[in-house]
Amino acid sequence: MRVLGVIRRRIVAALRCRLCLPAAVALAIATAGVGYGVLYDDIVTALGALLFVPSAVILFGVASRRSEGLDRVPRRPS
């Protein structure tokens, strides 16, 4: 029962992060597209699916920065 509680808390925390879900979807699309392209020798599909990777990485980066509270760091005066 303890393991289910930990899993449930992690799922709830991930669903509260509004940017984690689109990032996970973009990463899943990229993985599926590359897998399909490699499996069926379709290099255009595989390379096209790689275009989703930067958006997923950027979304994960923004989400992790917001969850750690780094957005509240005061900026230096210019």
Image (spheres, rainbow, N blue to C red):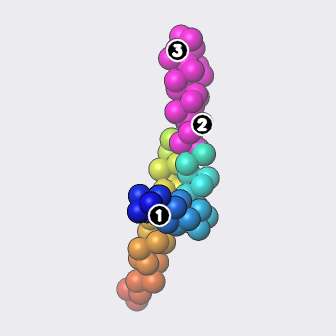
Classify 57 as above or below 50.
below
Residue 61: image location, x then y, percent: 45, 59
User: Which residue is labeled 3 in the image?
Assistant: 39
Q: Which residues are magenta?
A: 26-51
**2 or 3: tag closer to the N-terminus:** 2
Q: CA distance from mark 1 to mark 2?
A: 29 Å
Does the segment drawn in magenta span residue 5? no
Q: Position of residue 74 (x, y in %)?
A: 41, 87
Q: Which residue is mark 2?
A: 29
Which residue is at the far top? 41
Looking at the image, is mark 3 or mark 1 earlier in the sequence? 1
**Is there a contact, CB below 8 Å, between mark 1 and mark 2?**
no
Q: Which residue is mark 1?
A: 5
What amino acid does circle 3 point to? Leu
Q: Is residue 14 above or below residue 28?
A: below
Which sits earlier in the primary sequence, circle 1 or circle 2?
1
